[in-house]
Amino acid sequence: MTQDKPTFPYIPNTDKDREAMIQAIGAESVDHLLRDITGTVGDKLPSLLPRLSEMELQRDFRSLASKNRNVVQYPSFLGGGAYHHFIPAAVKAITGRGELATAYTPYQPEVSQGTLQIIYEFQSLVSQLMDMDVANAGMYDGSTAIAEAALMACRITGRTRIAVLNSLPPRHIEVLRTYTEAQGLEVYTVDSTSISIDDFTACLVTQTPNYFGYVEPMDKIERIVHSHNALLVISTDPIYLGMFESPGALGADIAVSEGQPLGIPLSFGGPYIGLFTCKTQFLRQMPGRIVGKTTDTHNRDGYVLTLQTREQHIRRERATSNICTSEALVGTAVVAYLACMGPKGLRSVAELTYQKSHYAAKQISDIPGYSLPLKGTFFQEFVVECPISPKEILSQLYTDNLIGGMDISDTVHNGMLVCVTEMNTRQEIDSLVESLSKITSQGKLQDEYSGPR
Amino acid sequence: MDRSVPGRTGAFLAESDVPKQELPPKEELRKDLKLPEVSEGDVVRYFTNLSQMNFSVDTNYYPLGSCTMKYNPKINDELASLEGFAHIHPLEQDWEVQGALELMYHLQSSLSQVVGLENASLSTMAGAQGELAGMLMIRAYHRANGDEQRKIVLVPDSAHGTNPASASMAGYQVVTVASDDMGNMDLNELKRLVSNEVAGLMLTLPNTLGLFDNNIHEICNTIHEYGGLVYGDGANMNALMGHTLMGPLGFDVLHLNLHKTFSTPHGGGGPGAGPILASARMAPFLPTPIVAKSHSGAYSLVSPQNSIGKLGGFHGNFGVLLRAYAYIRSMGSQGIREISSNAIINANYILCQLKDYYDLPYDRLCMHEVIISAKWQKPYGIRALDIAKRLIDHRIHPPTMYFPLTVDEALMIEPTETESKETIDHFIEVMREIAKEAVNDPQLLKEAPHYTPNTRLDEAKAARKPNLRWSGQ
């Protein structure tokens, strides 16, 4: 091996192989094969950072990783749409299998029965969890699932207005606006005390538990929406469903959720998966992949991608959506997680989360200067009104080696959204309480802050 | 899951360590939750057995055209699972996640370097979402210039289905442009269709026929002359890296598929990532967020000035982004070029070795993929589908079939650079044998595949009577 010519572990062919192939093609050199390319850069290569060997790569990436505070080493009270839950080791072992991770979209069913059957399981379990008729194979994330649900409601009803409950997380509303504005659809927010819906409203989009972590009273909302023949879209949290009433029971026409809590690592916001379900009557307006059970020429059961005439590769500009992915590997983790947990396990996760978050809320509200401004039932998150701006509080928590809450002072005065899950120990909760106790309306009592900013 | 036995469980959770809290009223609580009750061993064996019913890049040669099924380096998965990446929360303060932001910043600039467009947003979670973002940016650009009469987007007839679907989601009317006999875009057609009502053109380069359009300069100039913009579908970037730059060629916006060109695993249909790259004039409209670096060297998430907004809950598929960045770092500038050179050699080698056995709709040098047609086999009752299914008997994944739509009985073969000459020679040998079988024993092909868990499946039945979940629900 010569030292001056670099070798690449992911490119097997040698100079000798290449020469033989170029000769077989009848070309003089590789440049001959590139002659159609215009605007060539000649010898000028893109100026990328220097190449790293696998050893160096490990070192370099470990160093980058160490510049991040992770929720395994630091107690975290941050939620707001992504949650730190327990993930059984079996889930990672399953999604780590190359046969699943390195397969393509299952267009060739005979060689994709593994992926296809897992998606069928996914659809089954997600339908059951949401208590809805049918599920698709998955969307990008919870936010885009909401946007696609609203678009679907507009197609079904032929209406152009989308009502959004103002307790929906602002992130979701922003994504919804980006997705719908160009199609000439109107998004408007309503308050649960005065829901204004008219005959041009396609749907009301709601979330329970809502942005603030509280259970949204759905029965009144459901009656108003359906009395105008609009559709009810409910976004929810899948762990919450281990304990609380399902969207199906609440009368949802389309129900969606961020699937991340079901066995997916936080991974700085992605990849996640959007769970997407609806009533059977709307099936043919659904976006995304759908897997169906059928039989082969020997009458054996098998699975295929189905109802594809809705999709972009058949219907092109008239497709229900442009989406191709189903986040299949993430969906695999969801199925493995739900299978490991079972009904009792999921209920335990939900109840532990509920118990611990309520314990934390009580302890925090007992600290002088702190209060819980919202009333009602919450699940894993709650709003704390702090004596000073949450920004300063978060700096103090940083100094005390804690992560989060989330600053929501733009919607609630000195509001901080605190999240507690089954992963938080009592000791962690108590240290959060202790940290907060150090801060009163007069400012910090002790431990002058010396962190960044 | 039909193996559920009441009482079994695959997980055991800790007891609560906090004083018991009062539960909400019973009527708010769920009465019934149907999930499987199975042991952990059951779960693992079930999935492992299912996985073995799949073809995958780790187990099979996968010459699937337009999908760039290259080898997915294992180190990248290992790096993605480091605690400092896998377990960081997307809403942590910027100063708590400087490592993640630094990585994203460098990925933005690496991708910019590779395609020759100044700015990037990594927030789009798939190629199709990148397309939607690009179309919305084009729309926002025209609106910012008070140019609101532009309602049309031109899309070649050979384009991926996502192109027209994305343009349509961005509120545009799609008009199709035909290809010419050489597989290029028909320039006369383009000139007939272009007007000041055209917002832009969506173009894949090399196109889905695996050909570098010889008229690319004139195409871009024509669109620009009429005030339109050129959107690049980067699905086929595996052909061009290190050889040409998309920005200088005339592209204004372009998306990349990190799960294709940059080796992140396809996952059986996701997750992918579809970053969007933009020229300086298009940069203010990029989707939010992007990563910026301050003079002091601190990284932060920011929103571009006239951003089209958010297209996802957080900052994109970070777990995919970091794998792609690791791949770029392990290849380096020289390696990036080697990828494309080798992909092109491999594809042309297949072309020349198969051209006496299969019809070549365009008999010219190809780029990183080659289209053949089963036209010569048709008189024997053999279709592209039958050839594809017979390949399965040889444990080779079929090429893409019946795409692009402009070619009769198309089979689209993309060998990628990560396959050796021996693997490719074996594929060629099998394809030649199948061509002979098509003549001598067509029935053998029509009944293929023979050794898979299922023979051909009844797709019509699946669509006619949808069975989409376990019965009894």
Image (cartoon, coloured by chain):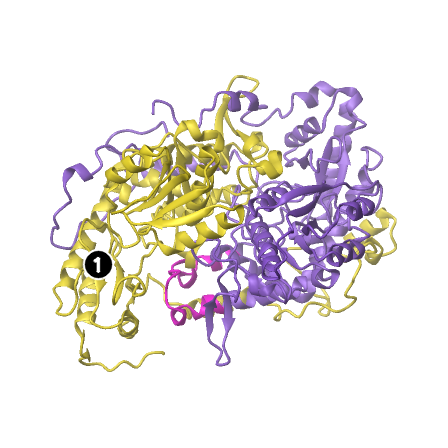
Colour purple, chain: B
* Left or right of A426, for residue A310: right
| Nearer the observer, A107 or B404 | B404
Q: In front here: A69 or A26? A: A69
Chain letter corresponding to the colour yellow: A
**Range shown magenta:** B76-102
Q: Quadrant of the C terminus of chain B?
A: top left
Read off the residue under disc 1. Answer: A425
The quarter of the picture where the N terminus of chain B appears is top left
Residue drawn at x 46%, y 32% is A117
Q: Secondary structure at mark 1?
A: loop
Q: Nearer the viewer, residue B128 or B329?
A: B128
Q: Is residue B329 above or below residue B50?
A: below
Position in image of residue B240 (x %, y %): 72, 56
Q: Chain of mark 1?
A: A
In reply to whether residue A395 is colored magenta, the answer given is: no
Q: Is residue B465 above or below residue B111?
A: above
What's the amino acid at mark 1? Thr
Horizontal relation, residue B240 to residue A122: left or right: right
Is B79 a magenta residue?
yes
